[in-house]
Amino acid sequence: MKGEIDRNRLPKHIAIIMDGNGRWAAKRAMPRFFGHKAGMEAIREVLRACSDIGVKILTVYAFSTENWNRPTDEVSYLMNLLIEYMHKEINELNKNNVKVKILGDLSPLPPTAVEEIEKAIELTHNNTGIQFNIALNYGSRAELISACRNIAKEVRDGKITVEDINEELISNSLFTEGDYDPDLVIRTSGEKRLSNFLLWQSAYSELVFADVMWPDFGKEELMDAILEYQSRDRRFGKIK
């Protein structure tokens, strides 16, 4: 770690694009599945570290709407890995007061995966520790389209008027309803793009791009990203 974290200026919400599992595995002459499995270990460490220092929300980009275009066997493996993670980790998450929330449309997921997810949400619903948002079958454009359709229906049904449409209404129509917008968005693997992730919510987020692949991203790398965040002058369009 490159310095000391200021606990009084922690990001309330950290969002992570977990990139590089496949390339991490390829460098070790292993199949992509090996990288995805190793990536699960990184999630455990980062979630624990965020909880320990007092971050309120951690959001991870687990499976995008575009990931369905990957080879069938890889998609199947990712779904099974999700089921395995939920089944194995949920009691530990609950024990540590973690609240699980899902961002995305679960309807295309296998029934077994949905069942495990719903169990996790129900079991941790009243927990008051860190909120763990898992973006599954998530795409920000699809999220915004869904929000627009729901708002249009409310206008059509006379529940609201066109004049009622504002930033707050749109924010409350998204999967992240009630959450802080992410203060810090991290992407691993050296790629520098948002890839359809929290586009509305990250309008004023600080972006940090880490060169390490996701399976190698741990507590030290997280703290370095937070230090980088704390070095920024956040003005939100204003002049100090």
Image (tube, rainbow, N blue to C red):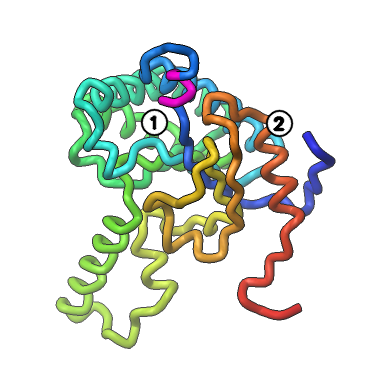
Along the line of sight, the residue nearer the viewer: 129 or 163: 163
Residue extending farthest to the top is 29
Q: Please name the residue that numbered disc 1 is placed on.
A: 120
Q: Quadrant of the C terminus?
A: bottom right
The magenta stretch spans which residues? 22-26
Residue 148, by quadrant, is bottom left
Q: Is residue 232 above or below residue 70?
A: below
Q: Amino acid at mark 1?
A: Ala
Element at label 1: helix
Q: Position of residue 169 (x, y in %)?
A: 38, 72
Contact, mark 2 vs mark 1 (Cβ under 8 Å): no
Circle number at residue 220: 2
Q: Position of residue 114 (x, y in %)?
A: 26, 32
Q: Position of residue 39 (x, y in %)?
A: 48, 24
Along the line of sight, the residue nearer the viewer: 176 or 41: 41
Residue 136, by quadrant, is top left
Q: Position of residue 187 (x, y in %)?
A: 53, 43
Tell me if mark 1 has few (under 14), some (14-19) or many (20+) residues whose alpha carbon lies within 10 angstroms of its own: many
Residue ID at (19%, 25%): 72
Q: Is residue 106 above or below residue 94?
A: below
Asked if the stretch drawn in magenta spans residue 201, the answer is no
Residue 99 shown left or right of residue 137 in the figure: right
Q: Is residue 68 above or below residue 93?
A: below
Residue 94 shown left or right of residue 102 in the figure: right
Asked if the stretch drawn in magenta spans residue 25, the answer is yes
Residue 236 shown left or right of residue 81 in the figure: right
